[in-house]
Amino acid sequence: MPSECEHFWDAGSYAVIGHQASKKPYPKITYGALKERGATVYAMDPDGGTVEGDTAYAAFDALPTPVQAAVLELPKEETAAWVAKAADAGIETIWIHQMTDTPEALAEAEKRGLKVITGHCAVMYNKPGMSMHAPHRWIWKLLGKY
């Protein structure tokens, strides 16, 4: 039976939010894997620009169409604000990349009634098959954490 983490990828449209110019690189693997799946996916970077040749939107209201889910791979100090922005945009399901959640971000998500996945690497679930994340996925399955 698919896990909650696997079901996250059943949504038809996504925003993948990160920074291109930061210590933590933009989540291009997550973005690319969604494109490969045929999902409607928009790159979002508060600074704009492009990701993989596609426009990177600075805000949810700039997206061409609303999205059903969002993946947040941002510095911890920005996560709570982006949780609020996602809720304001009508998004009900978010994935906060492992080690980037904060008590404030989780409290904001709970206050807004968002469904949140956190504590996991999005790529491990979004990019099936052989990849550098396959051993991590196998270990988590073995430990019953997948």
Image: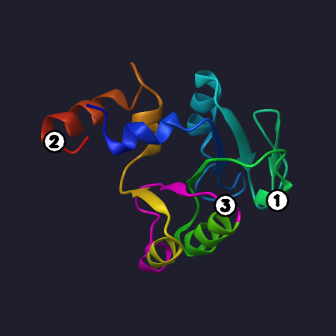
Task: Quote the CA–CA distance across marks 2 and 3.
Answer: 33 Å
Q: Nearer the viewer, mark 1 or mark 2?
A: 1
Q: Which contiguous range is marked in magenta? A: 89-106
User: Any mark on residue 7, and which?
Assistant: none
Disc 2, disc 3: CB below 8 Å?
Answer: no
User: Any mark on residue 61, and which?
Assistant: 1
Task: Quote the CA–CA distance across marks 3 and 1.
Answer: 10 Å
Q: Is residue 77 magenta?
A: no
Q: Is residue 33 above or below residue 91?
A: above
What kind of residue is marked 3? Gly
Image quadrant assignment for residue 106:
bottom left
User: Any mark on residue 144, and which?
Assistant: 2
What kind of residue is marked 2? Gly
| Sequence-first disc among 2 and 3 | 3
10 Å crowding of disc 2: few (<14), some (14-19), many (20+): few
The quadrant of the image that shows the N terminus is top left
Q: Say which residue label 3 marks.
A: 90
